[in-house]
Amino acid sequence: MELSKINRVFFVGIGGIGMSALARYFAKRGQVVCGYDKTRTKLTETLEQEGILITYLDEASSLPCAFLDNHDDTLVVYTPAIPKEAKILNHFINNGFALKKRSEVLGIISKGMFCIAVAGTHGKTTTSSVVAHILKDTGYDCTAFLGGITSNYNSNVLFGKNNVVVVEADEYDRSFLTLHPDVAVVTSMDADHLDIYGDKSHLEESFRLFAGQLKAEGVLYAHEGLPLEKSISYAASSTATARAEHLRVEGAKFVFDYADGTQSIKDISLMLPGKHNVENTTVAIAIALQLGIDAEKVKQAVANFKGVKRRFEYIVNNGSQIYIDDYAHHPEELRACFDAVRQLYPDKKLTVIFQPHLFTRTRDFADDFAKVLSTVDELILLEIYPARELPLEGVNAQFLLDKITLADKKICGKDFVVQYVKDTKPELILTVGAGDIDTIIEPLKNTLNNA
């Protein structure tokens, strides 16, 4: 399907962060955009305020008239997270509508554009957001489809006037194989999505296929140590090609130098904490310099990048109490997040509220989760967020809690977490998870600010 022939677009699962970015893109282009989602959220309410009609009833009868009958100019975009038995999805299937996954639509949009695609099991949202911000802030410009709400722009889609597009390339369900980038980044290849891939070797093969999608003169950046041939390595390491050096913490900010053997930038200040975010920023700098952007402008852009919502986001920082929220939901992500907190606040007691995401991920990485969660000072564990999955016998919060060696640990329902925090007044709180743990952010914020 050609982009110029699309006049109406319906999104099945419009509340997803990647889906909503596409919805905003088509609405900006002037197409009729509507969608369905199971749950009303702050994001879907924002989309409605922007003029997008959304139904929360999974019935064909709830569809707008424009999407009851099939038309050649109509595109239906769906997410694999939608159950196959969903009535709205089956209405479109049974009536022969043109159905595309989000990734396929990104392929259609980016076709013919200079595409910068960022992939990886961790770090791709922050990295793609830093890349897009540098291009925007320096005046180079770009269009961008991101997997998070950037704080600088309060959006997950950026609109540019040139031929450059930055996309977050999702490895789930091998979705990123629809892209043919000019510049590709692979941030990490840790085992994940084993419900799809079966084992780590098949996941790694998928990333190699993604790397093979590069255009003939394309450039591949890969985190140092990843088994990808013909790639430019990057890391906070003296042996990487693009590297962060002299990493230090100054005034609650991370500061480092950039070098790649050809160019260097001294004393780069970064609001985002943690070695992992320094490395994410390092590859973004490398890409910007490759594009010919002035090094001083790049440094200034990095310094004013405010981050991404739910990526080490400060919710409360009032002197007596600190509350940070993060999207981390894999053992390696949790480890990086905890390390960043410890570097910034080494003398404070760390209370972590964690919601596991998916029964299969909890089962597959139970020992790794237990090991990293045992390193905090106090743990409050919520029940597993199922997302698209049905329960697995014996896999629940208690199953995970029993493996954690930490003494100060407990299972708590979301309804009781806020009261617990009100009663105990922890000095340093971290909420982590990819499910609906974000629904307790505002209540916790209000409790702490009024303590």
Image (cartoon, rainbow, N blue to C red):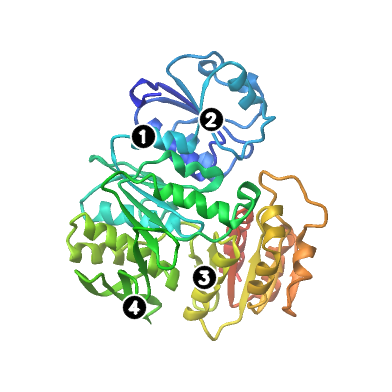
Q: Which residue is mark 4?
A: 238
Disc sitting over residue 109 in the figure? 1
Q: Which residue lies under the disc numbered 2? A: 35
User: Which residue is denoted by mark 3 in the rendering?
Assistant: 336
Contact (CB < 8 A) between labels 4 and 2?
no
Closer to the observer: label 4 or label 2?
4
Distance (Cα) linking label 4 and label 3: 20 Å
Q: Amino acid at mark 2?
A: Gly
Q: Earlier in the sequence, mark 1 or mark 3?
A: 1
Q: In the rendering, at what x and y percent does residue 354 appear?
A: 65, 64
> Between marks 2 and 1, how big is the CA–CA gap?
19 Å
The answer to which of marks 2 and 3 sits earlier in the sequence is 2
Question: Does residue 186 appear to the left or right of 66 in the view shown?
Answer: left
Which of the two discs, 2 and 1, labels the residue nearer the N terminus?
Answer: 2
Q: Amino acid at mark 1?
A: Ile
Secondary structure beneath dot 2 equals: strand
Tell me if mark 3 has few (under 14), some (14-19) or many (20+) residues whose alpha carbon lies within 10 angstroms of its own.
some
Q: Nearer the viewer, residue 396 or 317?
A: 396
**Of callouts 4 and 3, which one flags the residue occurring earlier in the amino acid sequence?**
4
Which residue type does callout 3 highlight? Answer: Ala
Disc 1 or disc 4, which is closer to the eye? Answer: 4
